[in-house]
Amino acid sequence: MAAHKLAQTDIAERPGQVDSSDGIDMGVLPSLMGYMLRQGHLCVSQDFFRVLAAENIRPPQFSILEVVSRNPGIRPSDVAASIGIKRANLVPLVTALEQRGLLTRASAESDRRAQSLHLTPDGAERLRYWHSVIAPHEDRLAARLGAHGRDTLLNLLKNLVRG
């Protein structure tokens, strides 16, 4: 079958092709975990960006704020390790959050050479609001997976990550 060009609205609604229903033969791709994980990631990310577009917050920034909120005084290197990003990539994200007044850096009490991270009152307030916005986003995506699909998916992904 001849491939046809996807309309721009199709691209916005669906990150990629999963099956050949649109006349595009995807070959082995839908049976590859990496391909499907990437497609799932795109689906979730696009919805996250749509929901929080006006807030100018990206998933890594949200993750940093969430970890810092649960671990006041945590070191940046520990945040980076916990969310799986390089320390060098964390620095500009923390700087941007600090410039927005959501996060502060201070000298760690145990080692004055090290830094510790803390949410500001505004950061804590914004994070509470974002939780309220993200809950329906999660519910909407979970509904696509069925009654126990979300829990099953999370357990499978945790097993994959843990090795």
Image: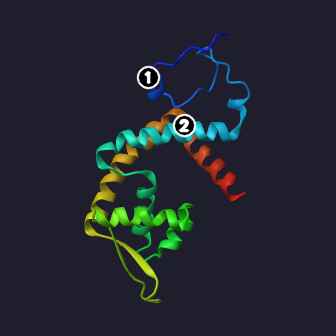
Pinpoint residue 5: horizontal percent, then vertical percent: 53, 17
- Residue displayed at 57% across by 46% down: 151
Ranked by sequence position, the earlier of labels 2 and 1 is 1
Give residue 18's mark.
none
Q: CA–CA distance between discs 2 and 1?
A: 32 Å
Is 57 rendered above or below residue 107?
above
- Residue displayed at 51% across by 19% down: 6
Q: 110 left or right of 34?
A: left
- Numbered disc in front, either 2 or 1: 1
Pinpoint residue 46: horizontal percent, then vertical percent: 45, 38
Is 86 rendered above or below residue 114?
above
Q: Quadrant of residue 119?
A: bottom left
Q: Quadrant of residue 146?
A: top right
Of all residues, the one furthest to the top in this rendering is 1
Q: Quadrant of residue 153?
A: top right
Pinpoint residue 125: horizontal percent, then vertical percent: 27, 61
Amino acid type indicated by mark 2: Ala
Q: Secondary structure at mark 1?
A: helix
Amino acid type indicated by mark 1: Gln
**Mark 1 closeness class: few <14, some 14–19, many ≥20 residues within 10 Å:** few
Give residue 147's mark.
2
- Judging by the rendered image, the residue that carries numbered circle 1 is 8
Residue in front for this viewpoint, 91 or 62: 91
Colour option used = rainbow
- Residue displayed at 69% across by 52% down: 160
Q: Tell me, yes or no, if residue 102 can be seen here.
A: no
Q: Classify the position of the N terminus by image quarter.
A: top right
